[in-house]
Amino acid sequence: MTSPGRATIRATVCGSSCSIPRPGRACSAYLMEVDAAVFVVDLGSGAFANVIKHRAAEALDGVVITHMHADHFLDVIPLRYALKYGNRSNGKRLALYLPPGGEPMLRRLVAAFAPEAGDDFLGDVYDVRTFEPSRALRIGAATLTFAPTAHYIPTFAVRCAVGTASIVYSSDTAPSLGVTRLAKSADAFLCEATLTRQEEADTPRGHCSAREAAEMAAHAEVDRLVLTHYPATIAPAELAAQARARFSGPIDIADDGYTLKV
Ligand SMILES: [Zn+2]
Ligand SMILES: [Zn+2]
Protein backbone atom coordinates (compact mmCIF):
# COMPACT_ATOMS: atom_id res chain seq x y z
CA MET A 1 0.00 0.00 0.00
CA THR A 2 1.17 3.56 -0.67
CA SER A 3 0.39 6.63 1.38
CA PRO A 4 0.57 10.32 0.42
CA GLY A 5 4.13 11.62 0.28
CA ARG A 6 5.73 8.18 0.46
CA ALA A 7 8.40 7.55 -2.16
CA THR A 8 7.23 5.00 -4.67
CA ILE A 9 8.60 2.65 -7.28
CA ARG A 10 6.71 1.82 -10.44
CA ALA A 11 7.90 -1.28 -12.30
CA THR A 12 6.57 -2.12 -15.74
CA VAL A 13 7.38 -5.52 -17.14
CA CYS A 14 8.56 -5.07 -20.75
CA GLY A 15 9.62 -8.68 -21.23
CA SER A 16 8.25 -11.62 -19.26
CA SER A 17 9.49 -14.54 -21.36
CA CYS A 18 12.31 -16.93 -20.62
CA SER A 19 15.03 -17.44 -23.25
CA ILE A 20 12.52 -19.00 -25.65
CA PRO A 21 10.00 -16.18 -26.03
CA ARG A 22 6.30 -16.89 -25.69
CA PRO A 23 4.36 -15.85 -28.82
CA GLY A 24 4.23 -12.04 -28.97
CA ARG A 25 6.15 -11.67 -25.71
CA ALA A 26 9.66 -10.31 -25.24
CA CYS A 27 12.56 -11.53 -23.13
CA SER A 28 13.52 -9.95 -19.80
CA ALA A 29 13.21 -6.19 -19.28
CA TYR A 30 11.83 -4.17 -16.37
CA LEU A 31 11.18 -0.44 -16.72
CA MET A 32 11.67 1.21 -13.33
CA GLU A 33 10.40 4.64 -12.40
CA VAL A 34 11.66 5.91 -9.07
CA ASP A 35 10.82 9.53 -8.34
CA ALA A 36 12.14 11.36 -11.43
CA ALA A 37 14.59 8.60 -12.42
CA VAL A 38 13.71 6.20 -15.24
CA PHE A 39 15.83 3.16 -15.99
CA VAL A 40 15.59 -0.40 -17.22
CA VAL A 41 16.86 -3.48 -15.48
CA ASP A 42 17.76 -5.95 -18.23
CA LEU A 43 16.95 -5.37 -21.88
CA GLY A 44 16.51 -8.78 -23.47
CA SER A 45 15.73 -9.68 -27.05
CA GLY A 46 12.52 -8.08 -28.29
CA ALA A 47 12.03 -5.93 -25.20
CA PHE A 48 13.06 -2.53 -26.55
CA ALA A 49 9.88 -2.40 -28.65
CA ASN A 50 7.91 -2.70 -25.40
CA VAL A 51 10.00 -0.15 -23.48
CA ILE A 52 9.23 2.57 -26.05
CA LYS A 53 5.51 1.96 -25.64
CA HIS A 54 6.01 3.59 -22.23
CA ARG A 55 9.06 5.86 -22.43
CA ALA A 56 11.18 7.33 -25.22
CA ALA A 57 14.74 6.04 -25.46
CA GLU A 58 15.99 9.56 -24.69
CA ALA A 59 14.03 9.57 -21.40
CA LEU A 60 16.14 6.77 -19.88
CA ASP A 61 18.62 7.61 -17.13
CA GLY A 62 20.30 4.22 -17.08
CA VAL A 63 20.37 0.59 -18.19
CA VAL A 64 21.41 -2.13 -15.74
CA ILE A 65 22.21 -5.61 -17.08
CA THR A 66 22.10 -8.50 -14.60
CA HIS A 67 24.04 -10.98 -16.75
CA MET A 68 25.29 -11.50 -20.26
CA HIS A 69 22.74 -13.96 -21.60
CA ALA A 70 21.04 -12.82 -24.83
CA ASP A 71 17.58 -12.91 -23.28
CA HIS A 72 18.77 -10.25 -20.79
CA PHE A 73 20.97 -7.82 -22.74
CA LEU A 74 20.62 -8.14 -26.54
CA ASP A 75 18.33 -5.12 -27.02
CA VAL A 76 21.06 -2.71 -25.92
CA ILE A 77 21.82 -2.90 -29.68
CA PRO A 78 18.48 -1.49 -30.96
CA LEU A 79 18.53 1.02 -28.09
CA ARG A 80 21.96 2.10 -29.34
CA TYR A 81 20.54 2.80 -32.82
CA ALA A 82 17.56 4.65 -31.34
CA LEU A 83 19.87 6.93 -29.36
CA LYS A 84 22.36 7.38 -32.20
CA TYR A 85 19.74 8.45 -34.73
CA GLY A 86 17.16 9.90 -32.32
CA ASN A 87 16.76 13.21 -30.55
CA ARG A 88 19.31 13.16 -27.77
CA SER A 89 19.93 16.62 -26.37
CA ASN A 90 23.55 17.87 -26.48
CA GLY A 91 25.09 14.45 -27.10
CA LYS A 92 24.37 13.18 -23.60
CA ARG A 93 25.46 9.56 -23.17
CA LEU A 94 23.32 6.97 -21.42
CA ALA A 95 24.83 5.10 -18.46
CA LEU A 96 25.01 1.40 -19.32
CA TYR A 97 25.86 -0.66 -16.23
CA LEU A 98 27.20 -4.11 -17.02
CA PRO A 99 28.12 -6.93 -14.66
CA PRO A 100 31.81 -7.69 -14.09
CA GLY A 101 33.17 -9.24 -17.30
CA GLY A 102 30.28 -7.93 -19.36
CA GLU A 103 32.05 -5.10 -21.13
CA PRO A 104 34.70 -7.15 -22.97
CA MET A 105 32.03 -9.66 -23.98
CA LEU A 106 29.78 -6.93 -25.38
CA ARG A 107 32.71 -5.31 -27.20
CA ARG A 108 33.61 -8.63 -28.84
CA LEU A 109 30.04 -9.08 -29.98
CA VAL A 110 29.85 -5.57 -31.42
CA ALA A 111 33.25 -5.98 -33.12
CA ALA A 112 31.89 -9.04 -34.93
CA PHE A 113 29.06 -7.19 -36.69
CA ALA A 114 30.24 -3.55 -36.69
CA PRO A 115 34.03 -3.78 -37.02
CA GLU A 116 34.26 -0.47 -38.87
CA ALA A 117 32.79 1.45 -35.93
CA GLY A 118 35.29 0.18 -33.38
CA ASP A 119 34.68 1.35 -29.82
CA ASP A 120 32.60 4.25 -31.13
CA PHE A 121 29.65 1.95 -31.76
CA LEU A 122 28.93 1.82 -28.04
CA GLY A 123 30.83 4.94 -26.98
CA ASP A 124 28.85 7.29 -29.23
CA VAL A 125 25.77 6.84 -27.10
CA TYR A 126 26.67 4.83 -24.00
CA ASP A 127 28.77 5.61 -20.97
CA VAL A 128 29.74 1.95 -20.45
CA ARG A 129 30.38 1.12 -16.81
CA THR A 130 30.83 -2.03 -14.74
CA PHE A 131 28.84 -2.14 -11.54
CA GLU A 132 30.55 -3.39 -8.38
CA PRO A 133 28.15 -6.02 -6.99
CA SER A 134 29.26 -5.54 -3.39
CA ARG A 135 28.47 -1.83 -3.49
CA ALA A 136 25.20 0.07 -3.78
CA LEU A 137 24.51 1.76 -7.11
CA ARG A 138 22.55 5.02 -7.13
CA ILE A 139 20.39 6.06 -10.07
CA GLY A 140 18.57 9.25 -9.13
CA ALA A 141 16.65 8.57 -5.92
CA ALA A 142 16.90 4.79 -6.35
CA THR A 143 19.43 2.65 -4.52
CA LEU A 144 20.27 -0.67 -6.19
CA THR A 145 21.95 -3.48 -4.29
CA PHE A 146 22.95 -6.86 -5.66
CA ALA A 147 23.35 -10.52 -4.76
CA PRO A 148 25.00 -13.22 -6.86
CA THR A 149 22.52 -15.85 -8.02
CA ALA A 150 22.81 -19.58 -8.72
CA HIS A 151 23.08 -19.51 -12.53
CA TYR A 152 25.38 -20.72 -15.30
CA ILE A 153 27.39 -17.50 -15.62
CA PRO A 154 27.97 -14.62 -13.15
CA THR A 155 24.50 -13.19 -12.55
CA PHE A 156 23.11 -10.72 -10.03
CA ALA A 157 19.70 -10.30 -8.45
CA VAL A 158 18.80 -6.65 -7.84
CA ARG A 159 17.03 -4.90 -4.99
CA CYS A 160 15.68 -1.48 -5.97
CA ALA A 161 14.78 0.73 -3.03
CA VAL A 162 13.70 4.28 -2.28
CA GLY A 163 12.69 5.31 1.21
CA THR A 164 10.89 2.30 2.64
CA ALA A 165 9.69 1.00 -0.76
CA SER A 166 11.50 -1.91 -2.36
CA ILE A 167 11.21 -4.30 -5.29
CA VAL A 168 13.55 -7.26 -5.72
CA TYR A 169 14.17 -8.95 -9.05
CA SER A 170 15.71 -12.41 -9.01
CA SER A 171 17.21 -12.33 -12.51
CA ASP A 172 17.97 -15.97 -13.41
CA THR A 173 18.58 -18.29 -10.52
CA ALA A 174 18.12 -21.72 -9.06
CA PRO A 175 16.88 -21.61 -5.44
CA SER A 176 19.36 -19.37 -3.64
CA LEU A 177 19.81 -18.32 -0.03
CA GLY A 178 21.60 -15.15 -1.16
CA VAL A 179 18.70 -14.10 -3.39
CA THR A 180 16.26 -14.94 -0.58
CA ARG A 181 18.23 -12.71 1.79
CA LEU A 182 18.29 -9.88 -0.75
CA ALA A 183 14.50 -10.14 -1.02
CA LYS A 184 13.95 -9.95 2.77
CA SER A 185 10.69 -8.10 3.56
CA ALA A 186 10.48 -6.54 0.08
CA ASP A 187 7.20 -5.01 -1.03
CA ALA A 188 7.38 -7.17 -4.15
CA PHE A 189 9.59 -10.00 -5.36
CA LEU A 190 9.78 -10.51 -9.11
CA CYS A 191 11.05 -14.05 -9.38
CA GLU A 192 11.77 -16.21 -12.36
CA ALA A 193 9.73 -19.40 -12.84
CA THR A 194 11.36 -21.10 -15.80
CA LEU A 195 11.09 -24.76 -14.92
CA THR A 196 8.34 -27.32 -14.73
CA ARG A 197 7.99 -29.43 -11.60
CA GLN A 198 9.60 -32.33 -13.50
CA GLU A 199 12.65 -30.20 -14.35
CA GLU A 200 13.31 -29.48 -10.67
CA ALA A 201 15.27 -32.74 -10.66
CA ASP A 202 17.65 -31.63 -13.44
CA THR A 203 21.30 -31.05 -12.58
CA PRO A 204 23.10 -28.82 -13.00
CA ARG A 205 20.52 -26.11 -13.28
CA GLY A 206 20.30 -22.37 -13.01
CA HIS A 207 16.57 -21.80 -12.78
CA CYS A 208 13.56 -22.18 -10.48
CA SER A 209 10.11 -23.62 -10.77
CA ALA A 210 7.12 -21.56 -9.61
CA ARG A 211 6.98 -23.70 -6.49
CA GLU A 212 10.61 -22.91 -5.66
CA ALA A 213 10.12 -19.19 -6.38
CA ALA A 214 7.25 -19.26 -3.89
CA GLU A 215 9.43 -20.98 -1.29
CA MET A 216 11.99 -18.19 -1.57
CA ALA A 217 9.20 -15.59 -1.34
CA ALA A 218 7.84 -17.26 1.80
CA HIS A 219 11.24 -17.45 3.48
CA ALA A 220 11.94 -13.82 2.58
CA GLU A 221 8.52 -12.80 3.92
CA VAL A 222 7.83 -10.53 0.96
CA ASP A 223 4.48 -8.80 0.60
CA ARG A 224 3.82 -9.89 -2.99
CA LEU A 225 5.24 -12.48 -5.38
CA VAL A 226 5.30 -11.78 -9.11
CA LEU A 227 6.30 -14.73 -11.29
CA THR A 228 8.12 -13.88 -14.50
CA HIS A 229 10.63 -15.34 -17.03
CA TYR A 230 8.36 -18.29 -17.77
CA PRO A 231 7.88 -20.38 -20.91
CA ALA A 232 4.86 -20.96 -23.16
CA THR A 233 4.70 -24.56 -21.99
CA ILE A 234 3.33 -23.76 -18.51
CA ALA A 235 -0.08 -22.06 -18.29
CA PRO A 236 -0.24 -19.01 -15.99
CA ALA A 237 -2.95 -20.71 -13.93
CA GLU A 238 -0.64 -23.67 -13.38
CA LEU A 239 2.19 -21.34 -12.28
CA ALA A 240 -0.15 -19.64 -9.81
CA ALA A 241 -1.39 -22.97 -8.45
CA GLN A 242 2.16 -24.24 -7.91
CA ALA A 243 3.15 -21.03 -6.14
CA ARG A 244 0.00 -20.95 -4.01
CA ALA A 245 1.03 -24.22 -2.40
CA ARG A 246 4.08 -22.49 -0.89
CA PHE A 247 3.24 -18.78 -0.53
CA SER A 248 0.13 -17.38 1.14
CA GLY A 249 0.44 -13.71 0.07
CA PRO A 250 -0.70 -12.10 -3.19
CA ILE A 251 0.67 -13.79 -6.32
CA ASP A 252 0.68 -12.20 -9.77
CA ILE A 253 1.79 -13.74 -13.03
CA ALA A 254 3.66 -11.07 -15.00
CA ASP A 255 2.93 -10.43 -18.64
CA ASP A 256 4.38 -7.82 -20.98
CA GLY A 257 2.79 -4.52 -19.91
CA TYR A 258 2.09 -5.64 -16.33
CA THR A 259 2.69 -2.73 -13.96
CA LEU A 260 3.30 -2.75 -10.24
CA LYS A 261 3.55 0.24 -7.90
CA VAL A 262 4.89 0.01 -4.37
ZN1 LIG B 1 17.05 -15.66 -18.71
ZN1 LIG C 1 20.45 -16.48 -17.91
Image: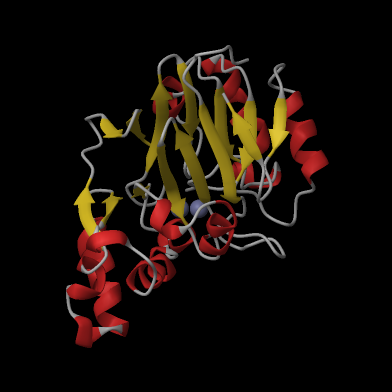
- Is residue 149 at all visible to an observer of this figure? no
Residue 198 in the image, given as x and y percentages of width and height? 70, 45
Q: How many marks?
A: 0
* Quadrant the N terminus occupies: top right
Which residue corresponds to the image point at 61% horizontal and 47% vertical from the top-left?
Answer: 194
Q: Look at the picture and state if 57 lies above or below 221.
A: below
Residue 228 in the image, given as x and y percentages of width and height? 62, 43
Residue at far left of view: 119
Residue 143 in the image, given as x and y percentages of width and height? 33, 28
Q: Look at the picture and state if 2 lies above or below 98.
A: above
Q: Nearer the viewer, residue 86 or 11?
A: 86
Give the left or right position of residue 187, taking residue 250 as reference.
left
Give the quadrant of residue 178.
Answer: top left
Q: Look at the picture and state if 20 lies above or below 109.
A: above
Which residue corresponds to the image point at 51% horizontal and 33% vertical from the top-left?
Answer: 175
Which residue corresponds to the image point at 80% horizontal and 32% vertical from the top-left?
Answer: 241
The colour scheme is secondary structure
Q: Nearer the viewer, residue 21 or 93?
A: 93
- Is residue 249 at all visible to an observer of this figure? yes
Q: Nearer the viewer, residue 13 or 168?
A: 13
Residue 57 in the image, given as x and y percentages of width and height? 43, 59
* Quadrant the C terminus occupies: top right
Which residue corresponds to the image point at 21% horizontal and 56% vertical from the top-left?
Answer: 127
